[in-house]
């Protein structure tokens, strides 16, 4: 069970760091407090966390595309940054998928 929850907590912390870098402090607070919904043993909370992980994956995709475009325009190398952000996006997507596992859903009743 813990193996399925820890990636979400890590992904939320990475998203908070991203928003902190952009000085979007309300989103930092939201990202850091989102894992607390894991303590609410209701299916709606689990669904909300899954949706937030999928939405966070889209945030990382947008950041990846923006960074690659910027670096290409400046003539700077972009492959390492794309690999890093792509990995973070994949981790965040995986975190959402892991929350959909049967073992996790069994602990969150309808």
Image (cartoon, grey):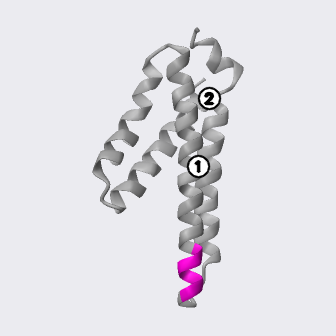
Mark nearest the camera among 2 and 1 is 1
Q: Secondary structure at mark 2?
A: loop
Residue 18 is drawn in which quadrant? bottom left
Above or below residue 46? Residue 108 is above
Most distant residue in the top direction: 110
Magenta span dominant secondary structure: helix
Q: Check if residue 55 falls in the magenta segment.
A: no
Most distant residue in the bottom direction: 75
Which residue is tagged 1? 57
User: In the picture, which quadrant includes the N terminus?
Assistant: top right
Which residue is located at x 42 percent, y 34 percent?
34
Most distant residue in the right direction: 102
In depth, the one of 105 and 65 nearer the eye is 65
Residue 84 is drawn in which quadrant? bottom right
Counting from the top left corner in percent of width and height, residue 14 is at 46, 51
Q: Secondary structure at mark 1?
A: helix
Real-space Cα separation, disc 2 to disc 1, in angstroms: 14 Å
- Magenta residues span 68-73
Is 51 on the left-hand or right-hand side of 102?
Answer: left
Which residue is tagged 2? 99
């Amino acid at each position: 069970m813990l193996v399925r929850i820890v990636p979400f907590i890590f992904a939320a912390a990475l998203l908070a760091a991203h928003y902190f870098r952009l000085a979007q402090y309300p989103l930092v607070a939201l990202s850091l407090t989102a894992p607390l919904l894991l303590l609410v043993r209701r299916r709606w909370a689990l669904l909300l966390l899954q949706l937030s992980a999928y939405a966070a994956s889209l945030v990382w995709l947008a950041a990846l595309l923006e960074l690659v475009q910027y670096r290409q325009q400046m003539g700077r190398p972009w492959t390492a940054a794309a690999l890093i952000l792509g990995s973070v996006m994949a981790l965040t997507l995986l975190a959402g998928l892991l929350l959909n596992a049967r073992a996790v859903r069994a602990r969150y009743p309808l």
